[in-house]
Amino acid sequence: MALTAETLHLIVICSSSQKITNSIVSPPMITMAQRQGPWPECLGLTGEACFDLIESSVSDDTLDLVIVPEGSILTKDFRKDRVRIFVNGNNVVYAVPGRG
């Protein structure tokens, strides 16, 4: 049974004298303003289009969005208030952006 973002399928197994039942549980609705990442939908977009998409999908106005050209030298520190958008020489996003 496949798990999807929209619906979580649970198999509930009762004691051996009872039958197996299936139930469907919908997860809480997450609006675009509550997104925390990652953003796989950015793959293949331009850096600027990805920047705009992420900026419009988070409610955190202190988020540091950075477009990073391929081959750039970076620090290795982890910051949950930063999203790096990695673009190739054609300004196309080649890695899934996420916090860090």
Image (tube, rainbow, N blue to C red):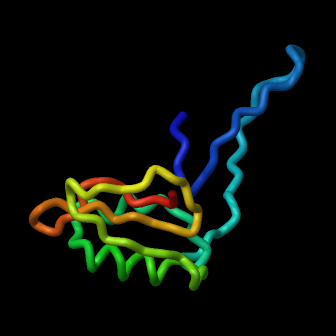
| Residue 94 in the image: above or below residue 33 | above
Q: Residue at x 38, y 78 (%)?
A: 53
Residue 1 lies in quadrant = top right
Q: Position of residue 11 (x, y in %)?
A: 70, 33
Residue 17 vertical placement versus 46 (above, below): above
Residue 78 percent coordinates (x, y) = 54, 54
Relative to the observer, which residue lies in front, 28 or 53?
53
Residue at image coords 85%, 25%: 14
* Front one among 66 and 36: 66
Farthest left residue in view: 90
Task: Look at 36% across and 82% down and name the residue there.
Answer: 52
Q: Is residue 65 left or right of residue 60?
A: left
- Measured as percent of width and height from the top left, residue 70 is found at 20, 57
Q: Nearer the viewer, residue 42 or 15?
A: 42
Image quarter of residue 43: bottom left
Please give the name of the residue rendered at 29% of the width and 55% of the height, measured from the top-left corner: 73
Q: How many marks?
A: 0
Quarter residue 49 falls in: bottom left
62 to the left or right of 47: right
Q: Is residue 85 left or right of residue 81?
A: left
Vertical position of residue 94 compared to residue 82: above or below: above
**Residue 23 place in picture, x, y as percent:** 72, 43
